[in-house]
Amino acid sequence: MASQLEAMIRQDIINGRLAPGSRLRLKELADAYEVGVIPLREALSRLASSGFVSAADQKGFSVGRVSAAEITDITAARLHIECKALADSIRQGDVEWESRVLAAHHRLDRLTLVEGPERILKPEWENAHEVFHQALISSCNSPTLLRLCSSLRDQTARYRFLAMRYDETTVRDVPHEHRQLMEAALAKDIDRACQLLCCHYQTTTDSVLEHAVLA
């Protein structure tokens, strides 16, 4: 139950249904999710460890705040770490790795990114997007690098939603970016793949910094 709750609340934070900085009152949330307080408290404690939720003594839980300084710092760390993981994965990649990348891209390429006038990031696309980027680095032989990549990817999820929600006027072909990245990786072109990955992530961050209201 706590794991299911963690996933549900995480998605509601990513999509902005639970606003950054808002108080998370246990009784209200228990009623909204139709659960008990004990598994809810456990779910919130888990989310606090990944930065989605803030916990303070005597003040309870609140949704983690978003800030320009945080997304800038996370992006810089992510570019440095994930490019190393991608380079290693491409070098080590075999036929099984190629199959994972192709399959993950095939699914991602056929899903719609956002839905509705509020431009809510679709959970199916978000899941497929995570699987695609995981597949790209899945042949990296460093568990530590992979663990760091996963943690940083988690922390940027909310900002990706903000980029989609507030940047609807920008002409950006995200599927094309993913296709180029896949092709460079499968061609074993490490320099180009890392350059495309950096551009892909930095464009999202720049969009957030330009359009979203951050602290």
Image (spheres, rainbow, N blue to C red):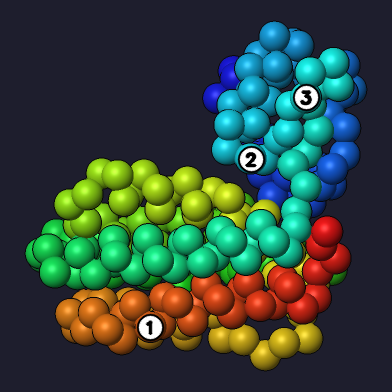
Give left or right: position of 108 versus 11. left
Give left or right: position of 127 versus 68. left
Circle 2 — which element?
loop
Q: Quadrant of the N terminus?
A: top right
Q: Position of residue 201 (x, y in %)?
A: 52, 72
Whichever of callouts 3 and 2 sits on the residue coming sooner in the sequence is 2
Q: Nearer the viewer, residue 55 or 120?
A: 55
Q: Tell me where residue 52 sits by quadrant.
A: top right
- Please say if 26 is above or below 194: above
The label on residue 195 is: 1
Q: Nearer the viewer, residue 186 or 154?
A: 154
Is residue 48 among the parts visible in the rendering? yes
Q: Residue at x 22, y 49 (%)?
A: 142
Q: Position of residue 143 (x, y in %)?
A: 25, 44
Q: Nearer the viewer, residue 10 or 88?
A: 88
Q: Residue at x 72, y 87 (%)?
A: 170
Whichever of callouts 1 and 2 sits on the residue coming sooner in the sequence is 2
Graded by Cα atoms within 10 Å as few (under 14), some (14 to 19) or many (20 or more), the crowding at tag 1 reads some
Q: Which residue is mark 3?
A: 56
Q: Position of residue 53 (x, y in %)?
A: 71, 35
Q: Quadrant of the C terminus?
A: bottom right
Q: Are marks 1 and 2 in contact (CB under 8 Å)?
A: no
Q: Name the kind of residue labelled 2 in the image.
A: Gly
- Please say if 50 is above or below 91: above
Q: Name the kind of residue labelled 1 in the image.
A: Gln
Q: Tell which tag, 3 or 2, sits nearer the viewer.
A: 3
Q: Name the kind of residue labelled 3 in the image.
A: Ala
Q: Tell me where residue 184 sits by quadrant.
A: bottom left
Q: Which residue is mark 2?
A: 51
Circle 3 — which element?
strand
